[in-house]
Image (spheres, rainbow, N blue to C red):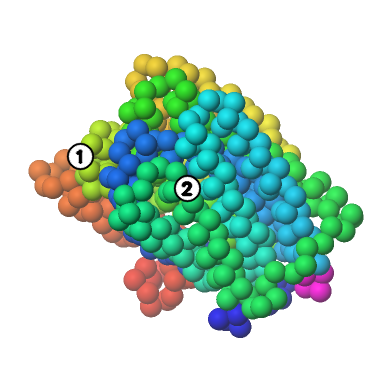
Amino acid sequence: MAILFGVASADDVLSSAGAGGSVIRGSVWRAGGNNAGIVVGVVAAALLLRHLGVAESGRYVTVLSLLAIPVAIADTGLNVSASRELALRAPGEREALVANILGQRLWIMPIALVGVTLFAVLAGYRASMVAGTVLAGGGLFLVALANAVLLRLTVTLRNAGLAFVDFLRQVVTLAGFALLVWLGAHLTPFFAVQIVVGLAVVAATRLLLGSHAFPLPRFDRDEQRLLMTTALPVAIALGLGQVYFRLVIVLMSLISSPHQTGYFGASLRAMETLINIPILIAGVALPLLAAAGRDDLARLRYAIKGLGEGAVIAGVLVALVTVRAAEPVMAIIGGAAFRPAGAVLRIQVCALLFIALYQIWTASLIAVGRQRQLILTNVLGLVGVAVFAVVLVPLFGAEGGAAASVLSDAVLASLIYWRLQAATGRVMVSIGFLGRVAVAAAVASAALVLPAPDLVAAALAGALFLGVGHLIGMVPDELRDALGPGGPLARKGGR
């Protein structure tokens, strides 16, 4: 397996004519692994929600949401900038850089975790939540170390191994939850499952990359200074983004009732697996975008537009399906007590369209070295979500929180596109493409009013959207070509 997923020359891959197809196929690998993980994650969420109930599961999601902030700063944010640096380095220089990235992670991640633990204490969270912050944080620290060395696979577009790790995390989480439910455990032990997940990811990393997967950490002054100079704006921006994304539930844990927080937390838990897809795809595309930004601005604009088209299709598809599927899905996951969370999910899922777009645009800004622009956009977005949440949560509870999330995601996407267009020129998807999406969505909407079971109507709406969209040329040619000329998406002729 180490040979199958080993490191090849990123220069050859990223500069080749087939790089775009590799990114699409890599995105399919990552999305496929994530989708398989969604199935496993739904079962895990069902066990958690049904066992802990509305209030306790809300506390669990609150702690994991808090921890997502240091993870965004000290893991995701640093990895994003490190991925760009690796993509631009000569092959012989990459191992030393990976060792420095690992060293950087060893001192930054603990500082971030201590900070969020102090917040949990100062916010007056109960002892089980503070202990959970420490336990789950330890597991996330292990995952961060593994992610640092797995960057080798990212920059060579070898995404099958990364998809395997994504799926493994969900499987281990499910196994841990199932054991704890069988033992009748209370809230705190569920956080410790993250430690087991971290150990499993470390073991899988050694399996994929071999016995020398983890180099001795290095702290070369020049490399550390360069990494911090390039990474700090990204880490700050993504940290603000996670504060922004999680601020609603944190505010709800302080100003709303445990039940309303639980409903919003259950909806957020259902959303998280879907949100991971555009994040993963943006991560897959970043090395190619960085190479294009260095060599060919026209190629970069073309790639951004193509990725944007995929984001719009996926976002509209999920929103359509959720109109009828939200309540039965939440009831399946959490039982009858969580059916009211369906109304929350139906609103909140609309944010996926904006999230998918701004993840791609964020990666594009990083690719062209404009990561500092993200600090401004995320600060403004953070102000927006705080205002929307403070106004809407007291009035409408969990549904107000969902509406605040959608509005603030739309604002953030607009702000990031504003800065991206200034850096690269116009990269918005075409009006003609949006017209085809609108036609397909209008036809599919007819299925949503049928007097059929909710899940049947939802599935029919999704099938109609994709089928009609395929017939009228909504699916990008590059996507069909990358998935195979004889595949199910193949179509003769141009658009």
Are the residues flagged by discs 2 and 1 in contact, CB closer than 8 Å?
no
Residue on which disc 2 sits: 191
Would residue 230 be counted in the magenta stretch?
Answer: no
Number of residues whose C-alpha sits closer than 10 Å to that of mark 1, classed few (under 14), some (14–19) or many (20 or more): some
Give 289 or 494, whichever is nearer the viewer.
289
On residue 472, which mark appears?
none
Q: Start and end of the magenta stretch?
A: 90-95
Would residue 93 be counted in the magenta stretch?
Answer: yes
Instruction: Say which amino acid is labelled 2.
Output: Phe
Query: x%, y% of residue 314?
Result: 40, 51
Instruction: Say which amino acid is labelled 1.
Output: Ala
Query: x%, y% of residue 450?
Result: 13, 44
Secondary element type, mark 1: helix
Question: Horizontal placement of 418 versus 179: left or right?
Answer: right
The quarter of the image holding the C terminus is bottom left
Give 97 or 299, whichever is nearer the viewer.
97
Separation of marks 2 and 1 at Cα, in angstroms? 25 Å
Residue on which disc 1 sits: 336
Secondary element type, mark 2: helix
Question: Horizontal placement of 119 versus 488: left or right?
Answer: right
Query: x%, y% of residue 92?
Result: 81, 74
